[in-house]
Image (cartoon, rainbow, N blue to C red):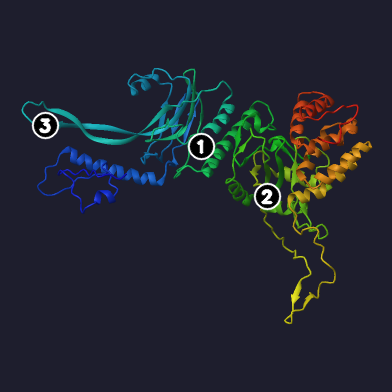
Amino acid sequence: MTTDLIFQPLGQPVSPYAGFAQSADIDPRLTRTHYFDGRLLTADDLNRDQTYLDRRLREVGQALGHGILRGLSLSLNQQTGTLHLSPGIGLSSAGRVLQLSIPLDVNLNERAEILTLNNGLYQRLERGLYAVVLKYAEEGKDVAEVFPTDLGTQKTAQYDVICDSVQLGLVRLPLPLAQMSTLHIRATLARKLAGDSNAGGAIQEDAVALGLLAISDDRPQWLDVELLRHPIEESFSEQQLQQKLSRHYNALITDIVDERNKGSLDSAFSANDYFQLLPPAGSLPKAAINPVKGTQHFFPDHYDVWIAPVRQSDLELIKQESMTLPPLDLALNEAVDIIVLAPLDNNHYHQYARRLERAFNPDKKRLASLDLLRLKIHPRRPVHELDTDAATWQAIWDTIGTMDLAFVRRPLRAAETAVSGIVLATGTSYPSSATDTTLPDGDSTASSDSTEPTDTSTPFVLDEDSIFLERVNLKRLSTIRPPSNNTGEEALNRLQDEFGKNAGVIQLIMTLLLRIDQRYDPVLWPTLYALAHREALKDFRSQLIESQQEGKPTGESVEHIAASLGIDIDLSGWPELDPH
């Protein structure tokens, strides 16, 4: 703030040189007393210096950030209603250092004490959500006489000293306490409070948040110590949002599994049952994954979920690398790649990972690599490329603990970003190619080690779509579900010509083939061609899945959905091939 106002105790400001006020940043709040011999000092002069030093110290604190530096662990005894806070240090957003040297215990059922401390204002605790905070407080101690300045003034008294202190308090938040289970409330609040470090401005600048407390029926119900609490951070950033979301998620998923175990429920639940937002990396229950059958129940069906063993020592590094990616919003129907990591010690990893490796194949131009296992909600056979994979995964699974699994979000595929990375495996060499060498006299000759022309029709390193199309394509699908008439043959040929190299279209067609019964084969391929030509395959698939989940007949659903997309299907015949 630039201003021409300079407050000095001796009177009018004196600029060191002309134009000083216009070329300097002068803050009138940051003034200190000028001491010299013969000066009369008053209380205002000394208080000014205290204010100056206090403000300068808080500026240092603001530069360091705000949050919990160490300690200050909060817990709730639900039987007695007592909040327990351990010693520690925090830093408020105003730059105040809040240090607690002794443990604090506050019984929220002691209403007489709470009433006294709050000057009779709070006789009961209203239903709602409260931030538990440690805030700055001042306390006056001892007595000092105030001598009169003239004969008409009475002698009075003031505090002798003022002590800085900290105090535990509750701050009512402008959020409703929903009528649902505790775990569902906490998971829902994660979306609302993950990116808000001061709960919408409810937490004052001279306080730090320690946790979120729910009050109902005039009693504390539950405490969440991760929703509002955060370590010291200089300024809120996207990666800090992921870290805060991850801390809360990992604490909540453990509570969910514990509660389900107490209620004799298994841990094979879906993330949608509790969460709306997931961090890009976190833990998940072992019961939600079955690599032997190739199934998973945790993530939505439209997620691409893979599983792979990983060294225990590499797990944290992999999770931290994924924390730079966006959170997983389960309400969005977006394509997401997830890898479930099964951590193993070095001995087990060396023993089992070798069995899952895919050998270097020079004919198909594939590098040696670990073969990831893809998981689906609905089991499909075969899920293992080799017969030995199932036995290997069963052996791996026997070494994994109940909550040892982790998941990480993968970046967009190379085919979607047009950016790819190439890793050459140990023991491989570059492919030989025919190269021209220009001689000094201008003639050129081929390299002596090239006796045959090099086949450049297939690149040495394939992207994901190319690998997928090598394994799954229209030709292979048509051998499983061959056209039953000439119209189907013609439709299949048109699909091959127009969409044979489109991996996304092939994936959608493959999904529909799994969901539509073979008795509809006379109209199947013409319908798929018409949908592909109209770019309606994805909408058709989504509506078909929804109809089948509601128990509607497939034939009726296919005819109705196709009609809504502008394609007339008569199940006794077939649609015209011309999609227009």
Residue at 19 percent across and 30 percent down: it is 158
- Residue occupied by mark 2: 310
Is residue 11 toward the left or the right of residue 330 in the image?
A: left
Q: Nearer the viewer, residue 116 or 458?
A: 458
CB-based contact (under 8 Å), mark 3 and mark 1: no
Q: Marks 1/2: CA distance?
A: 31 Å
Q: Quadrant of the N terminus?
A: top left
Residue 186, percent from left and from top: 55, 29
* First in sequence: mark 3 vs mark 1: 3
Residue 348, percent from left and from top: 71, 51
- Three-letter code for the amino acid on which mark 3 is drawn: Phe
Q: Nearer the viewer, residue 572 or 30?
A: 572
Q: Is residue 390 above or below residue 346?
A: above
Is residue 89 toward the left or the right of residue 220 in the image?
A: left
- Residue occupied by mark 3: 147
Closer mark to the observer between disc 1 and disc 2: 1
Judge the density around disc 2: few (<14), some (14-19), many (≥20) Cα neighbours within 10 Å: some
Residue at 73 percent across and 52 percent down: it is 463
Q: Circle 1 — which element?
A: loop
Residue at the extreme left: 151
Residue 475, percent from left and from top: 87, 45
- Residue occupied by mark 1: 195
Q: Is residue 108 above or below residue 510?
A: above
Q: Marks 3/1: CA distance?
A: 54 Å
Is residue 187 toward the left or the right of residue 298 in the image?
A: left
CB-based contact (under 8 Å), mark 1 and mark 2: no
* First in sequence: mark 2 vs mark 3: 3
Q: Is residue 470 above or below residue 112?
A: below
